């Protein structure tokens, strides 16, 4: 039985990861300050004696003996990470320093949940791991993008300088049950709007693209990444290469929910990337042929079902 720390474990992705790690017979310590996550995401795990939930902010140091650390703590939706940008960058940078310091001291493996945002508004398409990105260092998304980029730098430097066993994954847009209904991300926004027969808000003309990954595929990729041998450190893209225009997503959700909502167009937020699609050749190679199994329609069905049961239309 491994002892595993998951920071940000009460969030959307973290809660699925904790559940899966427990199901595989591990002991899981979930650390969260509940900024965007909540106890309700993991309440069903509390009856498991091998699950422990701790309220803690990773900008302060934390000491524990574990074998592995998954570092997910960080608000991930633009509305949430822009609410307090200084706190966001502190969470990424000081959180990385604290978790890397801990990993160094206890000789644990540590995995960083990085992001496709490190590529910014990409000039190459699809994005490969060797692309350095096109990121505005002083824009509204910078607290998140540059925080995550700096965290990657810290991970590499702790690895090179102190031999810390690291893994870096770059996660592309992920969706599924337990997304926060008001976090402003496109999949949750459109589903909630459709179920409430409210206007579907497309920012810009809806021709910008994203590639959407269902959460179970990501969790499988994360676990496989942690299990790779020491020579594999990443960064490795984890995402679903199926690329869709935002307007296509809106139409699909309208059709699947049978909603009476109308599509309305709103201004495009600053620095909103025009296109995004992962090249997952590296993931396939180093993660024993990992690839996403759940395509958009199937994943949306599960997510729509979840929101039907959690919001009051
Ligand atoms: P989320 O907001 O649901 O989860 C983040 C969790 O971190 C929340 O439970 C929150 O309360 C916690 N947290 C935030 N600041 C903290 C702090 N200072 N100390 C302790 N806990 C803190 O978001 P998510 O979608 O589950 O994202 C999880 C991770 O994956 C994030 O690091 C995010 O950057 C990364 N990621 C997510 C996506 C995606 O599409 N969902 C894409 C790329 C990267
Ligand atoms: N978006 C939209 N309407 C919404 C929410 C988001 O058109 O109600 C767009 C947003 O401008 C972006 C895309 O959908 O182009 C994905 O947004 P999200 O915040 O989910 O993720 P990110 O931009 O961080 O990839």
Image (cartoon, rainbow, N blue to C red):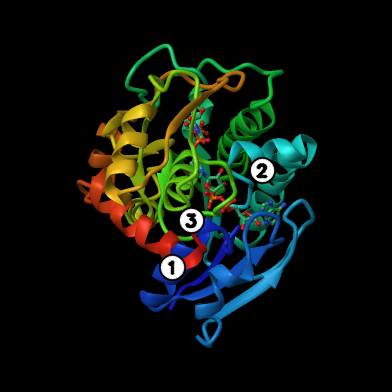
Label at residue 13: 3
- Tag 2 or tag 3, which sits nearer the N-term? 3
Q: Is residue 169 above or below residue 299?
A: above
Judge by depth and name the residue closer to the eye, 79 or 292: 79
| Residue 271 picture quarter | top right
Judge by depth and name the residue closer to the eye, 198 or 160: 198
- Tag 3 or tag 1, which sits nearer the N-term? 3
Give yes or no for contact between labels 3 and 2 (Cβ–Cβ under 8 Å). Answer: no
Which residue is at 70% across, 55% downward? Answer: 35
Distance, label 1 to label 2, CA atoms, is 24 Å
Which residue is at 49% across, 21% downward? Answer: 273
Relative placement, left or right, of 12 versus 242 is: right
- Tag 2 or tag 1, which sits nearer the N-term? 2
Would residue 277 be visible to someone looking at this image? no
Q: Is mark 1 within 8 Å of ligand 1?
A: no
SS for callout 2 = helix
**At which x and y percent is residue 132?**
48, 18
**At which x and y percent is residue 137?**
67, 18
Label at residue 309: 1
Discs 1/2, front: 1
**Image quadrant occupied by the N terminus:** bottom left
Discs 1/3, front: 1
Q: Is mark 3 within 8 Å of ligand 1?
A: yes
SS for callout 1 = helix
Q: Is residue 285 above or below residue 215?
A: above
Q: Which residue is mark 2?
A: 80
Label at residue 134: none
Q: Is mark 2 within 8 Å of ligand 1?
A: yes
**At which x and y percent is residue 119?**
49, 23
Number of other residues with Cα within 10 Å of mark 3, as a class: few under 14, some 14 to 19, many 20 or more: many
Number of other residues with Cα within 10 Å of mark 1, as a class: few under 14, some 14 to 19, many 20 or more: few
Q: Is residue 56 above or below residue 292?
A: below
């Amino acid at each position: 039985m491994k002892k595993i720390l998951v920071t940000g474990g009460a969030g959307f992705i973290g809660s699925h990861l904790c559940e899966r790690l427990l199901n595989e017979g591990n002991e899981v310590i979930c650390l969260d300050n509940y900024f965007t996550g909540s106890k309700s995401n993991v309440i069903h795990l509390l009856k498991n004696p091998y699950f422990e939930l701790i309220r803690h902010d990773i900008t302060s140091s934390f000491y524990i003996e574990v074998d592995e650390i998954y570092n997910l703590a960080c608000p991930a939706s633009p509305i949430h990470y822009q609410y307090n940008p200084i706190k966001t960058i502190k969470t990424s940078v000081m959180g990385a320093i604290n978790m890397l310091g801990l990993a160094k001291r206890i000789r644990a493996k540590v995995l960083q949940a990085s992001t496709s945002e490190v590529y910014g508004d990409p000039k190459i398409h699809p994005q490969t791991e060797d692309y350095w990105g096109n990121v505005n260092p002083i824009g509204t998304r910078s607290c998140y993008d540059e925080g995550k980029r700096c965290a990657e730098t810290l991970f590499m430097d702790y690895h090179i300088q102190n031999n810390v066993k690291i893994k870096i994954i770059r996660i592309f847009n992920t969706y599924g049950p337990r997304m926060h209904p008001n976090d402003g991300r496109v999949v949750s926004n459109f589903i909630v709007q459709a179920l409430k027969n409210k206007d579907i808000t497309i920012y810009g003309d809806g021709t910008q693209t994203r590639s959407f990954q269902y959460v179970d595929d990501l969790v499988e990729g994360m676990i496989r990444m942690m299990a790779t041998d020491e020579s594999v450190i990443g960064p490795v893209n984890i995402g679903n290469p199926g690329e869709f225009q935002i307007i296509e997503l809106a139409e699909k959700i309208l059709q699947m929910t049978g909603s009476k909502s109308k599509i309305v167009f709103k201004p495009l937020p600053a620095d909103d990337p025009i296109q995004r699609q992962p090249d997952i050749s590296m993931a396939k190679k180093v993660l024993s042929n990992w690839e996403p199994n759940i395509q958009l329609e199937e994943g949306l069905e599960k997510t729509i079902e979840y929101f039907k049961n959690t919001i009051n239309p």
